[in-house]
Image: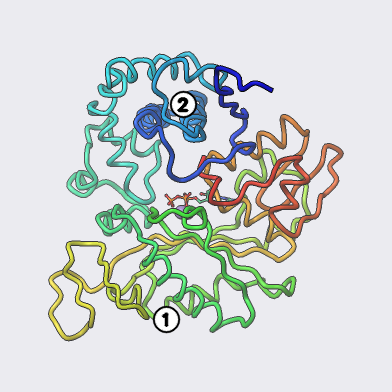
Amino acid sequence: PKPSADPPATTVKSYACQRRTPLKHHNTFLTDALEILAENAEFNENEGRSVAFRRSASVLKALPHVVRGMDDLKNLPCLGEHSVRVIKEILEDGTSSEVESTRQSEQYQAMKALTGVFGVGVKSADRWFREGLRRPLDLIHTGQKLNLAQQAGVQYYNDLNRPVTKREAVAISHIVEKAVNAVLSGAIITLMGGFRRGKEVGHDVDFLITHLEEGAEEGLMPKVLNWLEEQGLLLYQKTTRNSYLESKDGPARPPHNLDRFERCFSIFKLEKGKEGSGTSLNTSYDSGTTEGITGTTEQPGPSWRAVRVDLVVSPFSQFAFATLGWTGSKLFERELRRWAGQEKGMSLSSHALYDSKQRYLRANSEEEIFAHLGLEYIPPSERNA
Ligand code: 8DG
Ligand code: MN
Ligand code: MN
């Protein structure tokens, strides 16, 4: 057969969970812009608009080439009229006036700064913005009433807004392993979230903890936290039952399963110089002031930093679902649940999958869950939707 004149047009599937999205892609100049608009829509509590921009951006992340002209957008799914207009403007003028004015706007900047405080959501940030507050320190200066999470958020603001490196994530892994092993032998600890998808930095470190022996994981979270507390490694923690979205669109499940599934938002105290022990590399996250050998020189700053850590405990029977649910990205997760519901009449959560007849579908691996959903398996490194 003769080669055709035109290369085949790139086909992109419409759900993010049907396609491969690498961490590094070719269209950051467009996706960054669309994600500013998505973020701004979130600040205005317009979820529909925010998701539309995120879906558009995500499609461009999956393309194997740079978008150079409007022709490159032909046949692409999910690109709404508004997103197309923004893309067109950037392709023609180099920038989008809407994106630039959003970026410069007092509201966007204040909302970004205020929601950048751990424990502060859009609702509080918006109320403070309307009261004239602009920066995290304004919360202190105007004597706002803050809950414990927000107090910690303000106190450790600088550290928590400094990216966590892979090296630091590994150091935290060692601490979590030590803590878990001290209170229960044979537990399995897995790094989740962005680091599992291959990211080199993150805003936090996410862990999933389970045990091969069903039930052995019960009561583990408080014991681990006690141990960490005694060692002086915890700056803040809040444990909750993991009932994420379950009550809204989740299936009926035995209540005892829900009861023992726990999560913890925490802030760890990580000693500087502890990260990367065992290698001669000494890449410090700051201005290069960390000495290779600690204790022999005066440190100009504090000898530790604060790091956000999320811990989740799952019974082994739910481990595959929890693994899939905590790997991300957030959009990938959202699209998986949308696919399950809209295309298969199924119901997926980080605990279970139920088919259209409310029958529980067992799975021992992520691969089995994708298969139940009729999806090609996408490895974590390609879930950066
Ligand atoms: P980052 O920290 O590097 O910024 O990126 P990330 O690791 O992808 O983001 P994350 O905010 O730490 O979220 C990691 C995954 O955890 C994400 O896929 C969504 C999931 N997740 C939450 N909250 C909850 C929850 O309450 N329940 C469940 N099941 N999953 C959640 O963020
Ligand atoms: Mn994370
Ligand atoms: Mn997290």
- 239 up-or-down from 9: above or below: below
Local packing at callout 1 (Cα closer than 10 Å; few below 14, some 14-19, many 20+) is few
- 211 up-or-down from 197: above or below: below
From the image, state whether disc 1 or disc 2 is nearer to you: 2
Q: Which of 211 and 374 is in front in this view?
A: 374
Give the x, y percent position of residue 281: 29, 73
Give the x, y percent position of residue 279: 35, 78
- What amino acid type is highlighted by mark number 2? Phe
Inspect this view and state whether residue 179 appears: yes
Residue plotted at (37% across, 67% down)? 167
- What amino acid type is highlighted by mark number 1? Glu
Residue plotted at (63% across, 46% down)? 378
What's the mark number on residue 271? none
Place residue 241 in its image quadrant. Answer: bottom right
Place residue 200 in its image quadrant. Answer: bottom left
Identify the residue under disc 1. 230
Horizontally, residue 158 falls left or right of residue 18, namely left
Horizontally, residue 198 falls left or right of residue 258, namely left
Identify the residue under disc 2. 53
